[in-house]
Amino acid sequence: MSSSSNIKTLQTLSCDLLEDTLKEIRSHREKNSPPNEEHFLTAEYLLQEAMEYVAGAWEMIISEKPNASIALSRWVLEASLNLLWTVADRDKIDERLKVLVGEALRNDACLLEGLAKLWQDKNHKFESKAKEARKMRERLDVEKPPSLEERVKEIRQTGKRSWPELYPLYRICCAAAHPGLKMWERFCNVDELTVSKYPIDKQSIACWMAAASTFYLATYTYCLTELGNTDELKHWWVEQVVPLLYKN
């Protein structure tokens, strides 16, 4: 497991990268009014939302709650995969962004409809907003996107981008977030008695997820907005982050 000083350094590196990327994208959007403004708005929104998840992931690691940290990193990794799918074909970026917006509206409607059932005194307000979200989605005239797994296969088939080990990280996060009954990990038989074992150490895994999710989100927001330097980002990962992830 990484030492507490390494974890603190990784936390600083990740949060600083997220903030610096957000500042750069926000600055270009405000100053230049680019023709592809939706690309900048999407990148800015995802980076802004990710800040809470990334900060929370590192706070959970420091508090020795790696499972909670991995679950938080899942959000950022999924956002990264969505962006990777979006930018994998430059001719389809706007089309794919529209699909993602449509899916967000569908999810929002489902959320609001659920809230309407929980808070009966506010059900009219929630139901009204849910209907508005569904109407907005209808106006976009988009279908539900293929599953993430199918989109990953589609990206691989393009052959236009070297494939990072991003999807396996996402699958690890999904597995960690599910309430699996892993009794075989936690208990063993000793002299015909069932005794508890210490669970496997997940701190290092959680550090990988928190750092990698930040790296990929910054990378693909730059790809979407055609800003930044991906070689510099790779250098940041290889030279500054990876040594700390492996160092005890």
Image (tube, rainbow, N blue to C red):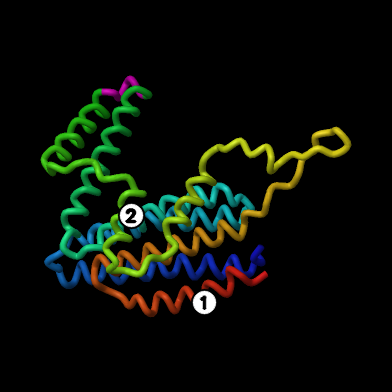
Disc 1 designates what residue?
240
Which residues lie in the magenta part?
Answer: 119-123
Of helix, strand and loop, which one carries label 2? helix
State left or right for residue 107 relative to residue 31: right
Up-down relation of residue 39 to residue 53 (above or below): below
122 inside magenta stretch: yes
Up-down relation of residue 82 to residue 143 (above or below): below
Q: Nearer the viewer, residue 11 or 164?
A: 164
- Tell me the quarter of the picture where residue 5 sits: bottom right
Q: Residue furthest top?
A: 120
State left or right for residue 225 relative to residue 185: left
Q: Residue at x 21, y 61 (%)?
A: 39
Q: Residues within 10 Å of mark 2 (few under 14, many from 20)?
A: few
Q: Residue at x 43, y 63 (%)?
A: 214
Of helix, strand and loop, which one carries label 1? helix
145 inside magenta stretch: no
State left or right for residue 235 relative to residue 36: right
Q: Nearer the viewer, residue 44 or 212?
A: 212
Q: Residue at x 32, y 34 (%)?
A: 111
Find residue 33 and report its horizontal and vertical position in percent: 14, 68
Instruction: Identify the mark at residue 153; answer none if there is no mark.
Output: 2
| Residue kind at label 1, given as amino acid type | Gln
Q: Residues within 10 Å of mark 1 (few under 14, many from 20)?
A: some
Instruction: Identify the mark at residue 62; answer none if there is no mark.
Output: none
Q: Residue at x 51, y 76 (%)?
A: 240
Q: Nearer the viewer, residue 40 or 186?
A: 186
The overriding secondary structure of the stretch rendered in magenta is helix
